[in-house]
Image (cartoon, rainbow, N blue to C red):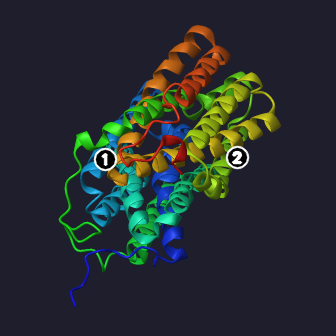
Amino acid sequence: MKRSFQATPGTAGPLFAMTAVALIAATYGLARFGYGLFLPQFSGSFALTPTIGGLLSSGASIVYCLAAAVGFRYAPHHPRAVTILAGSSASLGSAGIAASTVTSAFAASVLLAGMGAGFASPSLVELVRRNVTESRQDWLQSVVNSGTGFGVVAAGVLALALSTSWRLAWALIAVVTLASMIGVLMTDSSRARTAPGRQHHGVPARRTRWSDLRPLTHPVLAAFAYGTGCAALWIHGRTLLEQQGGMTTTSSAVVWIALGAGGAAAVLTAPWLARHSVRTTWTITVCATAGATGAIAALPGSTAFSFAAAALFGLAYTAATSVLIIWATHTATSSAAGTSVLFTSLVLGQAAGSTLTGSLIDAAGFVPAFAVAAAISLIGAIGFVRPARWRTSMGRSFDRLP
C-alpha cells in the first residue's frame, strides 16, 4: 500500500502547543518588543539619541516585513525551514545585542533580532494547520498567538530585575529563543508524514500567487488602520505615563507588565474567538483596543486606572491579532501566506501610526493625539467589514466565518 503524502492532523500533543507559544513569546514579546523596554539602558551604553532609537525601531519594522515576505513565499510549503529562520535570527540577534561593544554592531543585531517575529507567525500558522484537526485549528491558532503577552511580561520582569545587567538579560533571551525553536521542531508531529513539495492531499503543491489573496483586500485595509491606531500606546505609551502622568520609570515598566499580562490572558478568549464570527470578534476586540487607548490618555496619572487600561489593551490587541489569523485562514487559499500579508499590513500601519502620533503629540499634546489614534482604530473596526452577505472565496458567507 502506498504511503499517503497527507499529514494527518490531530496527533500533536500539548508539548507542541507549549513550545509554539514559547516561540511566539520569544520572537515577539522578547526579541522584538523587548528593545523598547531596554531602550533607556541601551541609550546609556551606546550613542543612541532619541532620533536614532526611533530609526532603529522603524528599521526593525522594515526587516519584519521583509521576513514576512519570505514567510509568504516559503512557509506554506516549508514551514519547518521558516521556523528555523525565525528562531535562528531572533536568537543570533539577541546574542549579538548581548555581545555588542560598538553602536554599529548593536544596531545590526537589533534588526536581526526583529526579523524572527516576521518568520515565526506564518510558519507556526502552517504548522498548527498540519498538526491539529480542522475543528481545533482556530482555537489553537489563538492560543499560540497569545504567546506575545507572555513574552511582554517576561521582558518587563527582565527589565526590572536585570536593568543594570542588560547583557545577561539578552543572553537569556537568546537561549530561550533557541530552545523554543528546537522544541517546536521536535514536537511537530507532521514532520515525518509530509513529503517536500506536496500538499496534504497528495497533489503537487502550487505556489501561492498574489491573485489568490484578492479576497484579503478588506482585511488588509482593516489591519493597516488598526495598526495605525494601536501604535500610539505601543510606541508612545510609556512616554505618556512618565511625562504626562508623572510615573517613575519603574512604575511605567510595571504598567507594561500589566499590558503583557492582559495579552497572556487572551489565551482564555480562544474558545470565544473560535465560536463567534469574525464580524463579531473583530469589532469587539478593536473597539476595546480603541477604548483602552483613549482611556489611558485621559487619566495617565492614576496608577490603578493605567494598569487596568493597559491590561485591557493587551488583552484586546492580542485577541484582535488572533482574529486576523482566523480571518486569513478562512479567506485566503493559504493560511500562512494570508497571515504574512495581514501582519505585514498591521506592522506597516504601526510604523505610519508611530510617526503620525508623534507629530500630533508635538503639535497638540498627548490627549488629542491618542484620541485621533483611537478614532483610527475604530475605522478599522467599522469601515472595512463588508456586509454580512459578502461571500469569501471559499464560498461561505462572512457572518458565518468562525
> Height in image: 161 above or below 377?
below
Q: CA distance from mark 1 to mark 2?
A: 29 Å
How many neighbours does mark 2 have within 10 angstroms: few (below 14), some (14-19), or many (20 or more)? many
The percent coordinates of residue 8 (x first, y second) are 38, 76
How many marks on residues? 2
Asked whether residue 87 is in view, the answer is yes
Classify residue 379 as left or right of residue 63: right
Would you name the residue on which mark 1 appears?
A: 67
Q: Residue at x 37, y 60 (%)?
A: 126
Asked whether residue 48 is in view, the answer is no
Query: Which residue is farthest top?
Result: 363
Quadrant where the N terminus sits is: bottom left
Which one is in front, 154 or 222?
222
Q: Residue at x 43, y 54 (%)?
A: 98
Which one is in front, 279 or 148?
279
The percent coordinates of residue 381 (x first, y second) are 56, 30
Would you name the residue on which mark 2 appears?
A: 258
Which secondary structure lies at badge 1?
Answer: helix
Q: Residue at x 51, y 15 (%)?
A: 359
For the residue marked with disc 2, what is the amino acid? Ala
Classify residue 301 as left or right of residue 137: right
